[in-house]
Amino acid sequence: MRYAAFISYSHQADSQRARHLRQALHGFARPWNRTRALRVFLDNAALSADPGLWSTVEQALTDSEFLILLASPGSARSPWVGKEITWWRQGPRPDKLLLVVTEGEVHWDHEAGDFDFERSTCLNETLRGHFTEEPRWVDLRWMAADHSGDLRDQRFQECVADVAAPLHARPKDELIGEDVSQRRRFRRFRQSMLAGMTALAVLATSAAVFAFVQRDAAQEQARLATARQLAATALNLSGDDLEVASLLALQAYRLQRTPESLSALYRTSALSPRLVRFIRADSAVTALAFTSSPKYVAVGTAGGAVEIWTTDGSRLVRTVDVPGEVTSLRFSDDDRMLAIAAGTGTTLVQDLRTEGRPRKLSDGEGATQAMAFAPHGHQLATVDGRGTLRLYPEVGAEPVANVRTGHDGSIMNIAFLDDSTYGTVIFLGLSVGWEVYGDKGGRTTKVASSDSTVYPFNDYFTAASPSGTCYGFVKNEGVTLYTPAELVQGETDERGPEISKSCGAPPGQLTDEADGFAVSDDGRAAIGTSDGLLLTTSATQDRRQSVETLSGVEAPSVLTFSPGEGDRLASADGRTVALWSLDRPGPTAHHSGLSLTRDTVHALQPPLAVGPDGSLAWSDSPGVETTVETMDNPRTWKPGASADSTVVGRGSFAMYDTLTYDESGRALYALIGHTLETWAVSERALVRKHSVELPKDGDFAGPIRLAALPGDKVTAVLPNGSVLIVDPSTGERSTAVKPRPSNLTAEDRERYRRKQVQRAVGERGALAAVEAANGRVDVYEVSSGRRLHRLDTGGSAVSDMFVSEKNRTLFAVVDDDVLESWNLATGELRWRSDGAGEYGIAADPGGRWVATLAGNGTVWLWNARAGDRLGSFTVPATDTAVGIGHTGSQTTLAFSPDGGTLWSVTQGGELLAWETSADAWIKQLCARVGRPLTQPERDRYLTSLSDGITACGG
């Protein structure tokens, strides 16, 4: 038979019990290797959607060996149950009907030989007369509708066994035993299968883990290679496209923090010290202008838009639309008015203090060729392409003067000059000569002129300064500048203008033809060449003569300086504008507002100490005219405070040699010559407490090295290599390390020659390093005087050393060029790299950075752990001492306690803070670029690994 049994039941009352019973019969006494013990038909489980429902049920009844009736009041009333019973009684196996009572009452009438249907409440009427004797029925009335149907329930198992026994044609007890045996076999099989599956799972997991590790390793290698490629591309582009190079360096670092990406990040942030920010215009830039004060910069484009930005490029203030390409821009002296000239011949004046539209001036004859505001006013002078000079009033559109000069397209410069006879006059610089116009009889007319040749015959580039007070030309061989006074001088009568300002002679010789040229009012010139942007500066009383390449941009076609001192510069190439600040030390630098004097002919490195709270202490050269009342030496200052909050002591009349804080920061030890002074430090005063004399030895040169020991004592490493422990309060001292023999001959002493021995002491005074012979270094434990290591640097001489006790490291510059890192715990060399400076070393207390200082003021930053040279910046040069031309010999370096700032102090210069954290470099780069990569740039430079990263902005 297809089915062992057919279950007939009331859907409303017994659906859950019917499912439980069917499932239990399937599993009871089931052989371990079969899915079910027997098959039982249940309509909801076995029937599919079928239009012939009764014929399907009838077929299932035909294919079933037994009928199991779930008797309940619901089934007693069910017509479907009655129909199924009727069919079964008329079928081939009517005697194989099993009764399972789930609800209601069942009573047998012995006299009648049938169920008592009057008292029985769960029997369907179709059962009348079917049984000739009382059948054995299974009682499931105890089973609630929410029963789990678990065969582990003993009562349910007994009932299932009662039903299953006739289905299997086996005694109940034997069937229960078979169920137990089959369950045991299945349990053993399951356990063996679980063991096998576990083994397979372990193997599969191991293989998967291995695959994942391999995949992750491959992805890591891909990220590493992509980051390195981006970093290399950034450095390659940094010379002439620092804008995109900065974004790629940021992209590389965000993708993977490697030595290469860190180096690219730092180098791009430190490159081009004068560069402040990039601005992107909507079309090609054709004109630029600055206000006199550091307030605005105006950008004119070929598309007829004028954008007015704050002078640092951080904010767009307003936009003015003009008809046609913008050809010229000029601000008035008070920064209120902006004159705009367009290629269509239209000239506009925009009042920046109002929201109104610009004032349109009456059109000239052709495009405006030059224009200038009168000093301290809003009168505007213009010259058009036909050589017509017009003077416009502060209000109105019509000119008050209209003079035809007769110089079509040859006017190079226009400027307002002061004259004792005519008052304000207008100077016109021509391609050959000049003319001066002034008020004569109430009319503007020519009062002086010259046709002397000013410009060379051909192949020159001309430019005028923002105020017109300097103008000139550039040829391959150099820059030539004039003032109107220099041209007018000697060629005017007594009534002519007399101006005596010089624009200077910018130094340098050009080797490339100029593509752009700009002149400042104060002797600076900027030239765009195929090699980039060249800045030449004439010497003044407060400024050194210099020639400098402003890196990071291609040859600009449009250039302009700010009026007056010309300390701001704007350059444009295509749609990109670069803004420059010519007086700032560098993009990662910050001014403290504190400067040092240089009243000595000797180049000295000022001592610089950093306290545990970040406070700084340094010494100055007070000068020969300084009195005790005006003495400011030594000096302390808390970073972030104002410059006038510096605390000063009344100490030495000369610069101190060495300064160091104690571990609390409340005491400062200062050394002048061989005198050790102790100063009490507070926020308001420096008070000298003690003074102790240390031993002298004339055979050795160099300052004494100091470090504070616990217990108010000091470690002093003398020039002769000896190490002393000094108690400043009592003057007592003990020798930890004996001095080195000088080995100087009598002849050497007669020649006043002294030996230079490099020495260093750790920040806590516990370790000291002394240069020995042949480039070796001895490292001592100060408390015991025991030599811990003799380090063989492999060089002929040691140029400088730095000991970090916290990081158990000694850094040494060998042979003026090689930087080495030594493990002081083991005495082993960690790494050595070329390219160090020999004038100083400073190490970050956190062990991340090392900085070395070269003679020209270049500071190289190194990765202290790996030895990679990341990049450099240059300390601003100062007036050099007599016979000495090195900024490095006048500068000292020191890190802040958190390593995020490197401080530099320069004799004759200032105290500067240089950012040395990746977060600061990222912030600086994003501020300078001010935009994310464009989609074309992403398509060109990025891959699928790096494209999901955004360097800056959205």
Image (cartoon, rainbow, N blue to C red):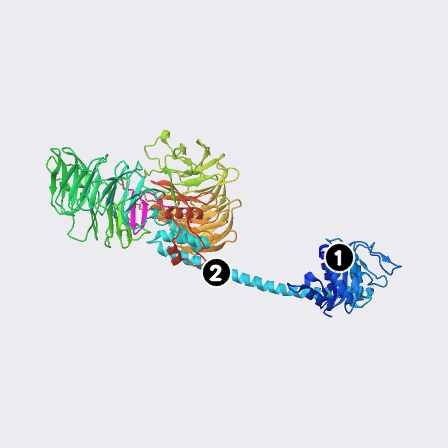
Q: Which residues are magenta?
A: 564-587
Looking at the rendered structure, the number of numbered marks drawn on it comes to 2
Q: Which mark is residue 75?
A: 1
Q: Which residue is more in the foreground, 770 or 750?
A: 770
Q: Earlier in the sequence, mark 1 or mark 2?
A: 1
Above or below for 894 versus 56 = above
Do we see residue 819 in this rendering? no
In the figure, residue 361 lies in which quadrant? top left
Above or below for 132 versus 891 = below
Residue 185 image offset from top left, x and y in percent? 74, 66
Pointer 2 local density, CA inside 10 Å: few below 14, some 14–19, many at least 20: few
In reply to whether residue 566 is colored magenta, the answer given is yes
In reply to whether residue 706 is colored magenta, the answer given is no
Pointer 1 local density, CA inside 10 Å: few below 14, some 14–19, many at least 20: many
Dot 2: what SS? helix
Dot 2 amino acid type: Gln
> Which residue bears the numbered disc 2?
221
Residue 817 image offset from top left, x and y in percent? 38, 53
Residue 576 image offset from top left, x and y in percent? 32, 50
In the figure, residue 706 lies in which quadrant? top left
Could you give the CA–CA distance between mark 1 and mark 2, rounded to whole angstroms? 73 Å
**Which residue is located at x 14 percent, y 40 percent?**
403
For the N terminus, which image quadrant?
Answer: bottom right
